[in-house]
Structures are given as structure tokens and as C-alpha cells.
């Protein structure tokens, strides 16, 4: 692993940049990477920094070999009053929108368990690569609540409303093959190939125009939140604005000259 990002070490995550890829790894192994206030604050800080850092072209979010993330730390959440619970979910939403709205493409590299807030994190990522032995689920209903980190909103957008209701209402776990059939994930690979597959995808995206990727990501995200005519108008404006970029000139010139484009993100 490379040096800690910007020379800073964190207590609940690992963060480093290598070959244009920003890595964020959950690092609470004794707690199965359960989410608490500190993890949310540290993850949000790194994600926002990656979004603004021109050195970072793509972000990979991962856990350890056995657990991606096991959801909220119930020992921390259980005693909260309603106002504290609302503040906690505010921090969850801030972190997950730092993934979903990030200027860089985000890749979830999942091994082992992704439950509750762990699955909600996966749902906020652009591309999802999971191990064939992964177990996923939104089990919050079993402890008297329901997914509060965007699960009720992103799950039906990634699958269907009836499947989302089934797994949110029952809290049942499901395996990698089921996740793939539902359209929830992009790829299933053996556990020992998850990180390399994620890196391979990240390297491919690193070769694209960072400006075009940013605008494409935003346009696709907006398609889930607006009517098609408004979305197409927004797409049109952002598409036309790319014609003021060096990347657009380089990309089209390279194609016409039958050579490989060298994008600079300008």
C-alpha cells in the first residue's frame, strides 16, 4: 500500500492514491466494519478530498477480505434519542452523497458481507463488483427500524419496486447470484479476483476524459430524479459545454488522425 493520503492516517479507514486511483478501505475489522460517527466523518472527508483532487481519476471503495461493511454500529445507535438519530442519518446521507455525487466514478469492490449501511454504500457507487461468496441484505426491519441511509430510495432504482419491498420488508439476505439477476451489481468474480477486477475497471476509466466522465455521471444520476425532457435538456447543455474543453478537441482529433487520445482533464 502507498503512503497514507496527504500524509494523514485515519482510525476507521485506510486511504491512499496509486496510479490515479483513490482507494478508501473500511478498517474496523473487530467491529465487522460497522458504521459509526467517526467512520462517517473520516470517509466523507476523504471522499470530498478525492472529488477535488485532480490526481484522483477513479475511486475504489472496499472492505477487508471477509467483510465490506456490516451496517450501523448498533451499540452506538441503540441509545440515541430521535434528534441524535436524525443527526446520525444526516451524517450517513452526507457520506453516501459524497459517493453518489462525487466528480469521480466510484467502484464498490465487495468481499464477504455487505449488510444494512454496507449495502446502502454499494448502492451509492457507480459500478459494483462483488465476490461470488458475498452475502447482501437490508436486515434493519429485524431490529424494529428500516433502511435509513438511502436504501428505500436507491434499492428500487437499482432493481424494481417489488423486489426492493420484498427484501426491505423481510430483511432476508441474498447471495451474489441473486444480486446479479436483480441488476444490482455489474460483475461477480471469485473473492481473490475482486480487487484486481476493480483495479482493471478503474485503469480503463482513468484513460477516459475526466470532464466527460463527470458530466456523463451527473447526467445519468439526474435521469433518476427528473422527467425525460428536462433530463435531455440538461444532457444537451452539459454535452455542448464539453466542446469548450481540450479533451473534446484531443479526443476527436485523435480519432480522425487514427491515434490514441491523451486526455488531460481540461
Image (tube, rainbow, N blue to C red):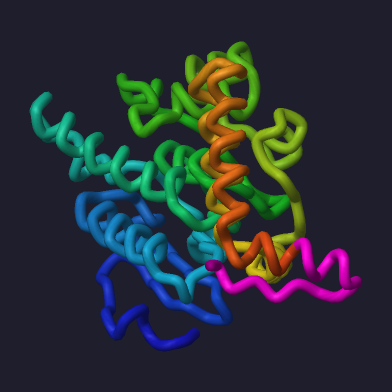
Q: Is 255 within the magenta?
A: yes
Counting from the top left corner in percent of width and height, residue 224 is at 55, 25
Q: Can residue 131 be seen in this view?
A: yes
The answer to which of 29 and 199 lies nearer the viewer is 199
Is most of the magenta stretch helix, strand or loop?
A: loop
Specify whether 198 is left or right of 187: left
Q: Is 53 within the magenta?
A: no
- Image point (54%, 52%), residue name: 214
Marks counted in the figure total: 0
Q: Is residue 130 above or below residue 218?
A: below
Q: Is residue 229 above or below residue 44?
A: above
Counting from the top left corner in percent of width and height, residue 54 is at 45, 71
In this view, the residue farthest toward the right is 258
Q: Is residue 58 above or below residue 82?
A: below
Q: Please provide the residue range marked out in magenta.
A: 252-266
Counting from the top left corner in percent of width and height, residue 62 is at 51, 61
- Image point (69%, 70%), residue name: 207
Specify whether 246 is left or right of 2: right
Q: Quadrant of residue 263?
A: bottom right
In this view, the residue farthest toward the top is 162
Counting from the top left corner in percent of width and height, residue 80 is at 12, 33
The answer to which of 124 and 115 lies nearer the viewer is 124
Q: In which quarter of the image is residue 213?
A: bottom right
- Image point (80%, 70%), residue name: 254
The answer to which of 50 and 119 lies nearer the viewer is 50
- Image point (73%, 51%), residue name: 132
Q: Can residue 195 be seen in this view?
A: no
Q: Quadrant of residue 94?
A: top left
Amino acid at each position: 500500500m502507498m503512503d497514507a493520503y496527504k500524509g494523514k492516517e485515519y482510525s476507521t479507514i485506510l486511504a491512499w492514491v496509486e496510479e490515479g486511483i483513490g482507494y478508501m478501505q473500511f478498517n474496523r475489522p473487530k467491529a465487522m466494519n460497522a458504521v459509526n460517527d467517526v467512520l462517517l466523518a473520516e470517509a466523507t472527508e476523504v471522499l470530498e478530498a478525492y472529488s477535488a483532487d485532480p490526481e484522483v481519476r477513479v475511486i475504489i471503495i472496499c472492505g477487508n477480505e471477509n467483510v465490506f461493511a456490516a451496517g450501523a454500529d448498533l451499540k452506538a445507535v441503540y441509545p440515541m434519542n430521535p434528534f441524535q438519530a436524525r443527526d446520525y442519518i444526516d451524517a450517513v446521507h452526507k457520506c453516501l452523497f459524497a459517493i453518489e455525487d462525487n466528480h469521480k466514478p466510484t467502484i464498490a469492490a465487495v468481499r464477504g458481507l455487505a449488510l444494512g449501511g454496507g449495502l446502502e454504500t454499494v448502492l451509492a457507487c457507480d459500478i459494483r463488483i462483488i465476490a461470488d461468496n458475498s452475502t447482501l441484505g437490508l436486515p434493519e426491519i429485524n431490529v424494529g427500524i428500516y433502511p435509513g441511509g438511502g436504501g428505500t430510495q436507491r434499492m428500487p432504482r437499482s432493481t424494481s419496486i417489488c423486489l426492493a419491498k420484498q427484501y426491505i420488508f423481510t430483511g432476508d439476505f441474498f447471495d451474489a447470484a441473486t444480486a446479479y439477476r436483480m441488476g444490482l451489481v455489474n460483475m461477480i468474480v471469485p473473492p481473490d479476483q475482486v480487487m484486481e477486477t476493480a483495479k482493471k475497471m478503474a485503469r480503463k476509466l482513468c484513460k477516459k476524459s475526466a470532464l466527460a466522465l463527470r458530466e456523463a455521471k451527473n447526467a445519468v444520476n439526474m435521469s433518476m430524479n427528473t422527467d425525460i425532457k428536462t433530463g435531455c435538456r440538461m444532457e444537451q447543455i452539459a454535452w455542448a459545454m464539453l466542446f469548450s474543453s481540450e479533451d473534446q478537441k484531443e479526443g476527436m482529433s485523435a480519432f480522425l488522425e487514427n491515434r490514441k487520445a491523451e486526455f488531460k482533464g481540461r
